[in-house]
Image (spheres, grey):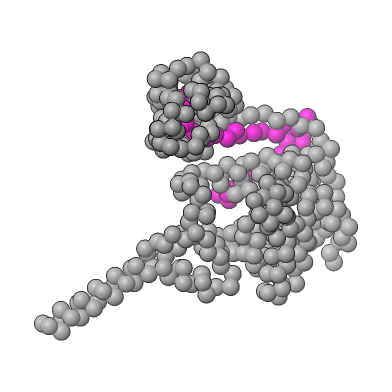
Amino acid sequence: MIWTRSFLSTFLLTLTIVYAFYFIPVPYYIYKPGTAEEVKPMVSVKNGDAEEKGTFMLTTVTMGRSSIFGFIAAKLSPNAEIRKKEDVLRGSSEEEYSTRQEYVMLDSQSSAIQAAYKRAAIPFTIDSQGVLVMQTIEDYPAFGLLHPGDRIVRVGTRDIHRHEDILNEIKQRKAGETVEITVMRGQTEKKVAVTLKDLNAIDKEKGKAASGGAAGTAANPDESRIGFGITTAELLEIVPEHEDKKVTIDAGAIGGPSAGLLFSLEIFNQLTPGDLSKGYRIAGTGTIDPEGNVCSIGGIRQKIVAADREKADIFFAPADRKKGECNLIADVPNASDAADQARKIKTPMKVVPVATLDEAVRYLEGLKPKT
């Protein structure tokens, strides 16, 4: 019986240790090589030329919370990167982070379309398609009532198309008033009642710096700033002058802003005569703005590995950027890191630094077709 109890105690202790190693999360995220996925199936240009002998591929990073075992494994892996939870979430909840990643993907698509249209000299206009809730702020009126990802349809009786519509409605109201806010949460319409408050007064009471959001227009922190306390973002639609140049993008579950450059290249290729791919397997990464500037991203080393696995011939990497460029708070040597990783894994893939969409297009235009 003593042996049995001892065995049972040892077994339970072992089981507890194994459970802790594999299932208890640690405050870190692990970045690993993801996928290199063809962009062509994601992009549609009405009456565009979609014929390609090669392919454009966006690259991804797999990211997830880590267990103790996963943390140790990542430490031993040459292709994994460990980041502190607070450095990834930057004060947001995981739900807010996920919503932000979904939005910046949509925003990158809008920027990619604009950049491609400008490079192809196609006139267009920009229409607002609504306002998304990006973050609710603790201690503010909307916290727990509105959720990240909600699309605001109406405030009171005013239909909402832009952020300014919310501000204009709030200007007409006073602290203490209750306003009905109509949102689309997924496919379901929800109505919530939120009591407006003076957000500056809340900030002073809690000892916080003034926060942004749909909170009125007071510039002076001593003035009243009436609102319900959210941060928002607008959804944009890019409308070409001629309907036959209309671009739509469906990236599925992929999030983040770093596919912008590859979206622009695919769009430009379909908008213009000829085949810019020239038979090459072209991977890459990089955010893009409406003017076609390519800016820095995270996970460049993991993306090099992902592209090499899919036998890419060329990898476009954002050029090294200095602090202050692209609103960066520090130097980001994306291209240098990409070239270093390519050497480490001994890939034949050529890493090409680019600072603009135009540089990438000119590089491809100068290539001989692959034989």
* Residue 97 in the image: above or below residue 9: above
Q: Which residues are magenta?
A: 226-255
Q: Quadrant of residue 144?
A: top left
**Residue 36 can be seen, yes or no:** no
Dividing the picture into quadrants, the one containing residue 1 is bottom left
Residue most toward the left?
A: 1
Would you say 294 lies left or right of 223 here? right
Q: Is residue 190 left or right of residue 242?
A: left
User: Residue 293 location in percent, x, y?
Assistant: 76, 47
Of residues 253 and 327, the one drawn nearer to the viewer in this rendering: 327
Q: Residue at x 65, y 58 (%)?
A: 59
Q: Nearer the viewer, residue 367 or 77?
A: 77
Q: Is residue 230 left or right of residue 126?
A: left
State the residue lying farthest toward the top: 172
Q: Spot the residue most to the front.
A: 222
Is residue 348 in sight in this rendering?
yes
Give the percent coordinates (x, y) of residue 23. 37, 64
Identity of the residue drawn at 52% across and 18% down:
171
**Position above or below: 238 against 355:** above
Looking at the figure, which quarter contains the C terminus? Answer: bottom right
Q: Is residue 273 left or right of residue 329?
A: right
- Report if residue 244 lies within the magenta region: yes
Residue 217 locus on image (x, y percent): 56, 24
Q: Is residue 60 magenta?
A: no
Residue 102 percent coordinates (x, y)? 56, 44
Quarter occupied by residue 234 = top right
Query: Is 22 placed above or below 210 here?
Result: below
Looking at the image, which residue is at 46% across and 49% down? Answer: 94
